[in-house]
Amino acid sequence: MCMVDPSDTEWEFTSVSHPRARKEHRCDECRRIIKSGEVYQRFAGKCDGYLSSYTTCSHCEAAVGWLIKACEGYIFGLALADLREHWDDSPDYRSPTLKLLIDGMASGWHDGLDEVPSAELVAAAVPVAAA
């Protein structure tokens, strides 16, 4: 069910930061525009000899927290598809919080106006057997 296998990928190095945007960026998960002044996650790393960087809005960063807890990771750019797959394939995962995360990502978080889901809310929505 989980798209990621944590043992599949060996990052040679990674760097994660949370800068405040000085210019507009596009979230690699929901594709919405991260506006100047918003805090977002910037991930950079080297894997299989390739340098990669990813930009994630704070809303999607909270949403991928669900996948990190349930699956021990996620594939950049495929978080929404993975969340939907969990919803579709297992009634055990269905919760109002997971639905909120799926709908929020699919809508681009209404252009960033939606409230960022709290880490506690997201973590509590993962079934104990999955965590």
Image (spheres, grey):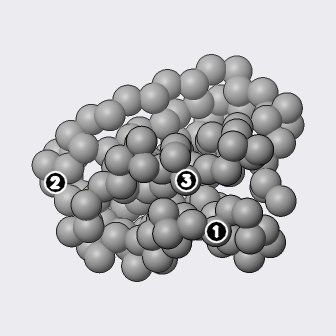
Q: What residue lies at 21% left-to-right and 68% top-to-bottom?
A: 113
Reading the chain from its start, which is encountered first: label 1 or label 2? 2
| Residue 82 appearing in the image | no
Where residue 64 appears, as percent x and y from the top left, is 54, 50
Q: Image check: 5 left or right of 47?
A: right
Where residue 29 appears, as percent x and y from the top left, is 50, 61
Q: Quadrant of residue 72?
A: top right
Q: Image check: 112 left or right of 121?
A: left
Element under disc 1: loop
Reading the chain from its start, which is encountered first: label 3 or label 1? 1
* Mark 1 Cα-neighbour bin, 10 Å: few <14, some 14–19, many ≥20: some
Q: Quadrant of residue 114?
A: bottom left
Which quarter of the image is occupied by the C terminus? top right
Q: Image check: 48 left or right of 31?
A: right
Reading the chain from its start, which is encountered first: label 2 or label 3? 2
Which quarter of the image is occupied by the N terminus? bottom right
Q: Amino acid at mark 1?
A: Arg
Element under disc 3: loop
Where residue 88 appears, as percent x and y from the top left, is 74, 76
Where residue 55 appears, as percent x and y from the top left, is 43, 49
In the displayed structure, would residue 11 be above or below residue 42?
A: above
Question: On residue 104, which mark appears?
Answer: none
Question: On residue 36, which mark appears?
Answer: 2
- Name the residue that disc number 1 marks: 94
Q: Quadrant of residue 40?
A: top left
Q: What residue lies at 62% left-to-right and 50% top-to-bottom?
A: 126
CA gap between label 2 and label 3 equals: 31 Å
- Name the residue that disc number 3 marks: 125
Tally of numbered tags: 3
In the displayed structure, would residue 53 be above or below residue 23?
A: above
